[in-house]
Image (cartoon, rainbow, N blue to C red):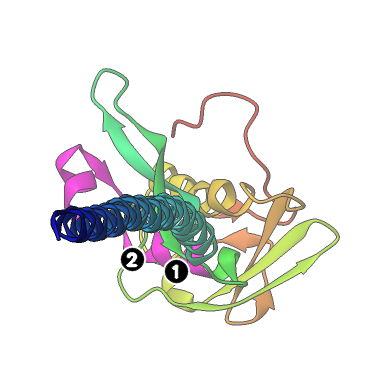
Amino acid sequence: MARRRKSGCGITLLFWIIIFLVLLIILLQMQDNKQKNKNLINRISNIFNNKKNNNIKQDKSERLVSIKNLQKKLQNRTDKRYISIDLYFVKYIESLDKLKLVKVTRKIRYTDMVLTKSIEELIAGPTESESRKGISSVMPAGIKLLGINIKNGIAYINFNSAFESGVGVSMLEARLYQVVYTATQFEGIKGVRFLIEGKSKSVFSAEGLSIRKPLTRLSGAPVF
């Protein structure tokens, strides 16, 4: 009888040892799986973060490229929308007691008829800020540009009869050369012939100034 009890206790102890080992194996597997899952989650997180960072870098790069392209487009658009022209007005030089031709540079909207636009701006006269600097014009009231024709390097510029009004040789000469210098700033135009009401004239105004030949820029300083 005593031997049977000892044998039964041994079997019971072996059973619990097996159970313990099985539970230990399960626990170790669970911990291993947990670590694997943690590693997997970390890998997925790293992949997501890297992709996010790459997207951010790409977005910044694309933004910079877009800004540069926009600046370039605006620059090109500005270049096409506006052009610089020179207008020639007069300024009284007290020490010389003469009128001196002075250049004023302006920006205007782009036009294919840039010479016509320049003469129209010349007729309109100096701006307020230019006038404050002593710049004026000897263009008469009521003057109108009737047309321009360019042939063989000569600009044939047609004005109404008001262009001849006024007295004083110096003032009238300055008026003619305001037009001549403004027109000859453009490539291909060497001189100007003046027409009044569509008719070519050899004598300008009652002062009898000769305009038989095309007028060109003066060799010396343009003072009158």
What is the x, y in percent for residue 64?
Answer: 43, 51
- The quarter holding residue 149 reads bottom right
Residue 206 in view of the camera: no
Given residues 148 and 162, the one toward you in this image is 148
Residue 169, relative to residue 58: is it above or below?
above
Q: Identify the residue under disc 1.
A: 120
What is the x, y in percent for residue 216?
Answer: 68, 44
Residue found 34% across the figure and 57% down from its top: 33
Q: Are marks 2 and 1 in contact (CB under 8 Å)?
A: yes
Image-based side of 138 in relation to 191, left or right: left
Residue 19 in view of the camera: yes
What amino acid does circle 1 point to?
Glu
Q: Quadrant of the C terminus?
A: top left
What is the number of the mark on residue 124?
2
Residue 162, relative to residue 181: is it above or below?
below
Given residues 40 and 35, the one toward you in this image is 35
Residue found 71% across the figure and 51% down from its top: 191
What amino acid does circle 2 point to?
Ala
